[in-house]
Image (cartoon, rainbow, N blue to C red):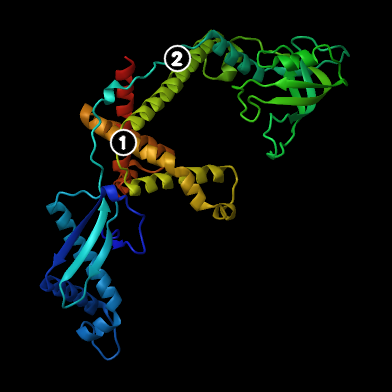
Amino acid sequence: MEAGLHSAHSHGPALNPEVTREIEVEAPVEEVDKAFKRVIKSYQKHARFPGFRAGKVPDGVIRSKFAKELRQEVLESLVAEKFRTAIEAQNLRPISQPQIVEMLLNEGAPLKFKAAFEVLPEFDVNGYDTIKIEKPDTDLTNDEYEGELARIIDQHSAVESVDEVRPLVAGDWAEIEFSGEIKPLAETVGEEKPAQQPITGEDVLIEIGGRNTLPAFTDALKGKKPGDEMTFEVEYPADFGEQRLAGQTVSYDVKVKSIKKKIKPELNADFAKQLGDYESYDDFTTKLREHLSGGKKSRLENIAQEKMVEELVARFNFPVPESLVQQQVDARLDRGLRALAQQGMSSEQMRALDFPRLRAAQRDSAVNEVKASLILDKIADAEKVEIPQEDLDREILMLSLQQREPVEALTERLAKDGTLDRIREQMRREKTGSALYVKLVG
């Protein structure tokens, strides 16, 4: 709190006036002078000046040489103490660093100051348990299972060249090189569209008639021989996995370089042991199905929970503290910069980024995330959701293993900087969201 008391004229984010509170604080001249004398005496013990014995430097010399430092120390002690007493007396709980909007602090005069800060908004979440949530179909389909199994087997298949010069048939793998051009969609007259980069590939393997091969490629390649060249168009579905191609029509120039065969591994216990700690091939396929089933269930339920939270955010309107929004923007930018660093972006390149524009782009998402957190906190109170100490201890243990830091040292550090409380709060929100989802979908 002491470090957070600062001038609003030069520091601190703008506050949302709808959740901003302002208090006036005073202290009599006697308390101000007492605070100055205490600080001056502390300086006298350590100050060293030519012509004066240690501890005997006159008050006037101390005041002259350290005027700025004396005032700052009195401010940090006396102002912080008076501010804390004032907010406790008025039962106020600041959630932002207090900003000093007026300050009168001089030796020989009463202390007077005003401080502004944000508090949590007052709102209710009546009707939160009437949100309509559609339960997703999380059952794993046989096609999904067979597709993943085929992908794993394909990854472990040996690729051999076919020396015979013959046409491509179903089951063959065509090694091709290609160049593709995305055809422009109907354009508004006079509107300029940015040029699309060509799509190119070398030594790409395409399975003729394969489950993951688009029919247009199979139709164009079937019956062709190494050395053949062709041009054809492919219309990609709107839900195609690669966003750049989804819903687009691409004109391809393709050359067949060779024919390949993939020799699948023998599906037995030896193959299963190559893939992991499996007793048999049946053991592998059983656990694969369980893993895929659990992954699909978790993924779709997470999506459904996200939609549920979006519904809650849309239903309840209330003012959002700007300090919390800016904290969330900071967190989002931090995650983004870490991702860019992992992708190879240098520090110099990061410093050249347009941070005001990046912060503005994150604002709407940050506001919704803050609203979601405040709503879930209210619902957690209503549902009496708590995080047992053993759950928190388990989370800290996982963090200590990830960061390779002793549990005791990590716990002490996280408690000191407030991260431990934030971890518990986030765990409580996640638990609340999961419990509410189960309650709503039945």
x and y percentages locating residue 396 in the rendered image: 34, 37
Q: Which mark identifies residue 225?
A: none
**Towards the viewer: 98 or 314:** 314
Residue corresponding to mark 2: 138
Above or below residue 274? Residue 417 is below
Label placed on residue 317: 1
In the displayed structure image, the side of residue 130 where residue 272 appears, left or right: right
N-term mark: 1 or 2: 2
Along the line of sight, which residue is nearer the eye, 15 or 263? 15
Q: What's the amino acid at mark 1?
A: Asn
Q: CA distance from mark 1 to mark 2?
A: 32 Å
**Which of the 4 quarters of the picture holds residue 98?**
bottom left
Q: Measured from the top left, where is residue 163 in percent x and y?
A: 86, 16
Please tell me in which quadrant of the rendered image residue 312 appears. Answer: top left
Q: Nearer the viewer, residue 378 or 182?
A: 182
Identity of the residue drawn at 19% across and 66% down? 78
Residue at 29%, 79% in the rendered image: 66
Direction front: furthest residue? 189
